């Protein structure tokens, strides 16, 4: 039997279902390849293949390319496999090797920060895995055309490394509408086809033009929306028109994944609350209830993962969380001892909190707070977190350090917000600003780890202090970090970043604040966690917000929030400009 005409692949890290956690998969890929064997065992990224060598699961974007190809070619002509199976499939008849690139050079938000903690020029695991594909001996032998696409393909263009990796075509943008003609020209070797193909926003497909994938995706990813429209200037999808997939399309996608062994479905969305949204970003709760209930009823599906949500709808209408909790918390794979669920389950949606600075928020992302104003963001976050935690939603929250123009005062506002969240149940991950392609900030200068201020280091390591205590308090892992931090500082950290990281690292390692408080902005002196769990967040802000007001934090009362009037035409303005 001859080799297939087209082979599709993705790196092992991007295809992995390790720990059934999308954020742990992303964070694991930030580890420098040099230390990968220290952090992971050899089976961590060994993905499952079918008996014929084809991949059981790969990123959903690659499955979409495969599905579009199968409209034009036979199954035997199109093979999707992992890198360790390339030599089984790539052969003399293979014309194209298509590679999914989520983070091929390791310069996305998380990767660029965490790999460089150990040194400026260390190669992140994601980048090493991409190199393993493009440098594979079987490619050198048969020389198929190399086509790269995916959300991180822009990295290769920006770094001018297409020649180095012998990439024939780089495709950037949504492909469904343009795919048939584009791929035919690639197969034919059309000399008029540019090497870098940028698909314009006008070519975005309608949901009716987007097919149901033919085979299972990593984590059982099923798209429920595309685009957003809230207008955050650092985010690509925020500039795209929001589209919701029909319910029958979603359920058919779930059934495809379940039929090939998936027991978990991950809902792919820039904001789940925008699914079948009503005017002015109003959450369509009945539509979400119907959709989630239909997914749960598919035979074989045991758990559901959410992706992104926004905080403002939670505060505007807390009944959203009350009504959706029965569809998500009992079906989450996440378990935490602070959960009040009988089986200690908790939902863990991703929420971009981004900053505590009202000035930066107003400059770069004020549509995220709609219908509230930028100066209310801190209060909205606190109230929203209380509502989520009360219903066993323990979110994965991201912050961006180093937004253009960030000052010490901005960082202090973020630290104030972080202090106010000290009792919250959730994960807080600091990332650094990266000027992503196809955003309003793509020409801005990215933040650099070497340029972090003392306050930014304090923010960074205080976040991780929270996370360490939330997930590992009292465990052997916590003790290992406490012992390892002084070694890191003296052998590497001080040399790489100077003495500014000394006291933030000390807090992370568990040194009591009374010993370091004069070197830090935040002071946790006298604050003690309940030995049986974290001190209840409700005690801090629930009883009429009395305690918070006494501290001068000016938190908005829930009844006041419900009656705040949206500014005229702001929704339309956000859609149009992101301002």
Image: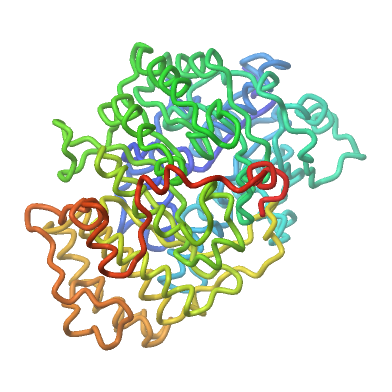
Q: Nearer the viewer, residue 477 or 292?
A: 292
Q: Position of residue 550 (x, y in %)?
A: 25, 67
For residue 493, above or below residue 424: below
Q: Residue at x 63, y 19 (%)?
A: 211
Residue 243 appears in which quarter of the rendering? top right
Q: Residue at x 51, y 63 (%)?
A: 112
Residue 30 appears in which quarter of the rendering? bottom left
Tell me which colouring the rendered structure shows: rainbow
How many marks the image carries: the answer is 0
Image quadrant occupied by the N terminus: top right
Most distant residue in the left direction: 531
Most distant residue in the right direction: 192
Report whether 321 appears left or right of 408.
Answer: left
For residue 172, above or below residue 332: below
Q: Position of residue 462 (x, y in %)?
A: 31, 69
Q: Is residue 124 visible?
A: no
Q: Residue at x 30, y 76 (%)?
A: 522
Image quadrant occupied by the C terminus: bottom right
Q: Position of residue 258 (x, y in %)?
A: 41, 17
For residue 77, above or below residue 497: above
Report whether 328 appears left or right of 565.
Answer: left
Report whether 444 appears left or right of 395.
Answer: right
Q: Is residue 119 visible?
A: yes
Q: Residue at x 29, y 48 (%)?
A: 386
Report whether 360 appears left or right of 351.
Answer: right
């Amino acid at each position: 039997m001859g080799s297939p005409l087209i082979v599709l692949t993705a790196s092992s890290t991007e295809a992995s279902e390790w720990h059934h956690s999308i954020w742990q998969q992303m964070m694991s890929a930030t580890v420098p390849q040099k230390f990968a064997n220290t952090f992971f065992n050899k089976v961590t990224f060994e993905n499952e293949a079918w008996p014929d060598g084809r991949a059981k699961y790969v990123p959903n974007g690659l499955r979409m390319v495969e599905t579009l190809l199968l409209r034009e070619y036979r199954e035997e002509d199109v093979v999707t496999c992992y890198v360790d199976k390339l030599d089984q499939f790539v052969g003399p008849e293979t014309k194209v090797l298509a590679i999914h690139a989520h983070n091929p050079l390791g310069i996305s938000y998380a990767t660029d920060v965490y790999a460089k903690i150990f040194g400026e020029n260390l190669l992140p695991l994601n980048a090493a895995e991409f190199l393993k594909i493009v440098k594979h001996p079987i490619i050198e032998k048969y020389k198929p055309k190399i086509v790269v696409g995916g959300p991180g393909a822009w990295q290769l263009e920006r770094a001018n490394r297409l020649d180095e990796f012998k990439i024939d075509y780089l495709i950037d943008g949504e492909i469904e509408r343009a795919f048939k003609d584009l791929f035919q020209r690639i197969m034919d070797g059309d000399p008029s086809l540019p090497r870098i193909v940028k698909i314009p926003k006008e070519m975005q497909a309608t949901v009716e033009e987007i097919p149901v994938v033919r085979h299972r995706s990593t984590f059982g990813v099923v798209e429920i929306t595309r685009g957003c429209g809230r207008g955050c200037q650092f985010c690509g999808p925020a500039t795209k028109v929001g589209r919701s997939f029909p319910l029958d399309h979603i359920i058919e996608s779930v059934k495809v994944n379940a039929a090939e062994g998936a027991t978990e479905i991950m809902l792919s969305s820039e904001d789940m609350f925008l699914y079948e949204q009503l005017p002015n970003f109003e959450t369509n709760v009945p539509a979400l209830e119907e959709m989630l209930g239909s997914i749960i009823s598919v035979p074989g599906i045991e758990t559901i993962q959410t992706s992104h949500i926004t905080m403002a709808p939670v505060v505007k209408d807390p009944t959203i969380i009350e009504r959706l909790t029965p569809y998500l918390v009992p079906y989450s794979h996440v378990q935490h001892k602070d959960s009040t669920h009988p089986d200690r389950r908790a939902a863990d949606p991703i929420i971009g909190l981004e900053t505590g600075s009202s000035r930066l928020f107003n400059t770069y992302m004020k549509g995220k707070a709609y219908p509230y104003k930028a100066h209310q963001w801190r209060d909205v976050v606190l109230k929203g977190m209380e509502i989520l935690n009360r219903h066993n939603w323990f979110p994965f929250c991201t912050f961006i350090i180093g937004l253009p123009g960030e000052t010490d005062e901005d960082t202090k506002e973020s630290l104030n917000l972080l202090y106010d969240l000290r009792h919250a149940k959730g994960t807080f991950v600091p990332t650094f600003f990266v000027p992503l392609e196809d955003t309003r900030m793509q020409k801005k200068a990215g933040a650099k780890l070497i340029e972090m201020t003392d306050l930014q280091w304090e923010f960074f390591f205080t976040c991780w202090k929270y996370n360490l205590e939330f997930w590992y308090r009292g465990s052997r892992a916590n003790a290992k970090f406490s012992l390892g931090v002084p070694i890191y500082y003296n052998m590497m950290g001080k040399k790489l970043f100077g003495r500014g990281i000394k006291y933030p690292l000390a807090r992370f390692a568990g040194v009591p604040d009374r010993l370091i408080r004069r070197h830090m902005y935040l002071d946790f002196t006298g604050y003690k966690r309940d030995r049986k769990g974290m001190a209840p967040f409700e005690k801090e802000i629930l009883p009429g917000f009395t305690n918070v007001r006494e501290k001068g934090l000016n938190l908005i009362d829930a009844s006041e929030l419900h009656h705040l009037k949206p500014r005229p035409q702001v929704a339309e303005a956000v859609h149009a400009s992101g301002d």
